[in-house]
Amino acid sequence: MGSTYPINTLVSHFKEKHKNHMSSNEYQLDCIALGAHLRLILHKGLPYLLFFYENKINIWISVYSVNTEDNDVMFQIQFQSVDTNKSLVFQANVTPFDDQEHCLNCLHHICSNNYHKYSKVGSNYDIINKSMEFSVEKSYLSSLLSCKHVYYTVNIMEETEDSLQKSLIRNLECPVCKMPMSAPIFRCRKGHAICNICSKKLTKCPLCKSQLTNSRCFALEGIAQDIELCCSNKKNGCTFTGNVNQCIAHENYCSVKPIHNLKM
């Protein structure tokens, strides 16, 4: 059986013992903090536990609710390059805390509680990282952000219907035409991405002025292929969803696309 910690006790404990490990609404982290860590984030006065684990290859992040109240919240991770202004934004669900599933000692592989799923006395504690809500390879971040040193900010936010779609579109936006990119996506020598159509019109990167190359940005192409976006005419009643290419093709003939009457 999972447990919910007394909210007042948890907040008081962090204020007394770990004041430097708690903040309001967001927490900024550095991609060199190897190991398992626990932080407390207060959002509208309610506490959320931030678990993050790093090794030399990957980053895993989860945010857990320890509240009995049912809140429509999610968490957002923004990865920011130290050397450039580039950033990546991702979002994931906040999940209820369960001490059998989300024990910090289990994450450290030092837990000996028999009833904990990932304790060291169990047979499958190594998969605890795979159960966390968000994970990413550091090499993937370095490639897209054109930077080896990256820091990231985790913040709690109200869950909205279009928040994830807006985040994904922002990461896929071509810096020239401002349209969502899809395969083939090319990049400059410093790693900045540009869509296929605009790459044929330019020889230099619009962001850093370095030479454009024929190298493909397969990571972004994979995102464009796998994500599910809503038609831009959703507010007019369209229910179509699809990946970037499917949405572009659909919107050319969407039945609820606004018709603009020109006055002569």
Image (cartoon, helix red, strand yellow):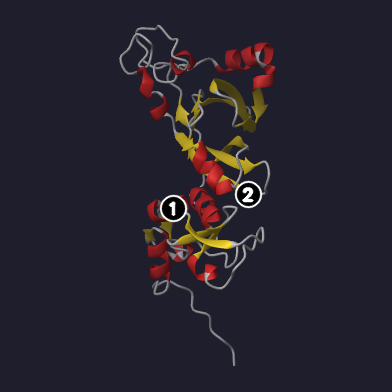
How crowded is the residue under tag 1: few (<14 C-alpha within 10 Å), some, or many (20+)? Answer: few
**Viewer-nearest of discs 2 and 1:** 1
> Real-space Cα distance between discs 2 and 1?
18 Å
Residue contact between numbered discs 2 and 1, judged by CB atoms under 8 Å = no
Residue 219 drawn at (x, y percent): 45, 50
Judged left or right of residue 45, residue 123 is: left
| Amino acid type at image mark 2 | Lys
**Circle 2: is it few (<14), some (14-19), or many (20+) Cα within 10 Å?**
some
Question: Which disc is residue 218 wearing?
Answer: 1
Image quarter of residue 248 = bottom left
Q: x%, y% of residue 174?
A: 55, 62
Q: Secondary structure at mark 1?
A: helix
**Residue pointed to by mark 2:** 86
Can the viewer see residue 44? no
Q: Secondary structure at mark 2?
A: loop
Question: Which quadrant is home to the C terminus?
Answer: bottom right
191 lies above or below 49: below
Q: Which of these two is toward me, 5 or 230?
A: 230
